[in-house]
Image (spheres, rainbow, N blue to C red):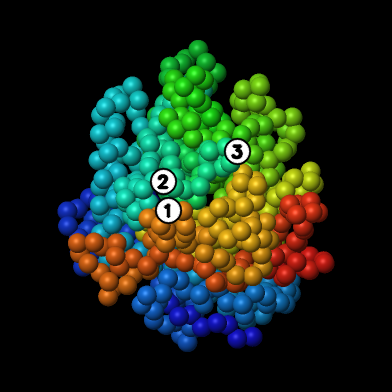
Amino acid sequence: MKLARIRAVAGCVAVVCVMAGSTASAVGATADGFPAGAQLAVTYAKALVANAEGRLPANMRANATSVGTSVDQDCFSAADNHIDPDVQGGVPTNPAWILRDALNVYCSTLRLRDQAASLSFGYGSVADGSALWLDQLGQQVTDGLGHIHGGVTTLVPGSQAADPFRTITAWEQLTGGTVNPVSFTSLDGAVLRGNIFMPPPGTPRLHNGKYPGVVITDGSVQAYQQLYYWAAEGLAQYGYEVMTYDVQGQGDSDLLPSNCPDLSATNICTGVPYQQNYNFYQGAEDSLNFFLSTSTKPYGGSFNPDFGSLDRQDVAIAGHSLGAAAVSWVGQCDRRVKAIVAWDDLLPVTMSQCSKNVTVPKADQATSVHAPSLAMTNDYEFNPQPAGTVPDPNGGANAGGLDGTAGYLSLVAHHIDSEIVSIRNGTHLTYSYIPLVLPANEIGERIAFYYTLAWLDEYLRAGKDPLLPASDTAFKRLTSLGAFDRSADYNDNRLDPGAAEIAIGAGTFNAAKFNPNDPSAANVPYEIEGIPIRNTLSFYYYSEFSIHNPRDHARARCNDMLAGCPAKQPSTP
């Protein structure tokens, strides 16, 4: 078969942060907008993309993305939706299947290509990285040696940089929303620090005058909360009160618990070293406790300053990577959680094991799985590689995602609403915006937001979003096999024209609009409106849903969204 022709050419490990963080280590910028200290990272990004491109035939290599366009739609071709692998002895023998695989690997790197080619991104990364590092340094001086911030990467200038077009300052100016810094003491005595994002003025509230809420737990290996501002800002624009925070040992939160070292304890320093389940699992619970705190019922020596605007009966939790594992457990073990969003990946939960994984207040302990859960996953983990054999379409530890469909299927067995969406040419870094080094595709983040918003609208807003057309219900968005609407691209706030038509976030570069006094003017944010949904789904791993229809309460079941929900699940999507 004929493949579409290409039109265009959670963490952060220490060495990656050193490379990406160097964006703030030199004064001034080179011709590409990045300082001299960042050229190693830029060179690496270009080389990674070029290596993937080099695996393609010459006639499939072309020019950069057309000026003014936002995404490479050739990476989401309907012609690629299904190719019979013709498996013989476990090895794909069909040349078209192998060629499609090479194209898919290439497409999984394009966010790096767009970053390295954008003057706007280069200038923005310098300013954002420097500001975040200086702010963190000042906070560390204020906190003193009794509260050492997490991880060695906090010492690297610029290491906390993420999407330069989603800084707190820029978001507040563009939308009118506000972000309030918070801190609280966790169960083991470490001080955790975060931010609460409040919706722009005029954003519709629930009937009780309050906002539904979401707490986001970041990923492991030094993934800071800044990497998830895409979700926090977008949800706040749609009327959610959202909290991000750094788990113990990462970002601005404490590296050590109180009384460390405690030689009398079995565990000398709880949560140390920082790369362990405790920090994320208990962090997800501690942050939920703080988020739900009030002036009369504080938590960890403090309370949510915006508790008066929060509907404490409508709260969800979301997380990435090890944070996704954490919210899988906390969301089912804590009865206060109404919905879960796991960005790579949702885990199956055994309720009898809750106490071994997380400490939940006795009054809030759940006795059975109860929280509807969305799983987002992807074709690749950190390093996209050609598929030498046909992957198991259910994913798993050795293919596409950490646990594949296991978490989804476990909830379906308990008749709990669930959905798993596998993003075509997506990577584990789709959900955490790390500049220049670790690969991701162009629109995976937008796809993740589309489903995240729809899932939360379904279970925290009774299926409707006041900023979207009445006919555009959450159930419709979650089950649609048509095209993406504009919900992931814009906040169309009809009640407050000042907050309308705002598209935020990194994308491609339009040189004709570049202005040194306003580098962001040449950034063209990625958009997915109008792209066929099925064309963005993995052709290696199943995307499925089992959701009750709020109209008649009947269960809508799809065993393979890519294939159009056939009566029998095919052996390959």
Residue 23 falls left or right of residue 336: left
Q: Which mark is residue 496?
A: 1
Q: Secondary structure at mark 1?
A: loop
* Snapshot quadrant of residue 253: top left
Q: Position of residue 84 (x, y in %)?
A: 71, 77
Q: Secondary structure at mark 2?
A: loop
Number of callouts: 3
Q: Which residue is mark 2?
A: 201
Q: Earlier in the sequence, mark 3 or mark 2?
A: 2
Q: For this rendering, which residue is in front, 522 or 239?
A: 239
Q: Position of residue 40 (x, y in %)?
A: 29, 59
Query: Separation of disc 3 and disc 2 at Cα?
Result: 20 Å
| Residue type, label 2 | Pro
Q: Earlier in the sequence, mark 1 or mark 2?
A: 2
Query: Separation of disc 1 and disc 2 at Cα?
Result: 7 Å
Point out the image quarter for the C terminus.
bottom right
Residue 97 falls left or right of residue 161: right
Q: Secondary structure at mark 3?
A: strand
CB atoms at circles 1 and 2 under 8 Å apart? yes
Residue lying farthest left?
27
In the displayed structure, 352 sits above or below 21; it is above
Q: Which residue is mark 3?
A: 314
Q: Position of residue 493 (x, y in %)?
A: 46, 56
| Residue type, label 3 | Asp
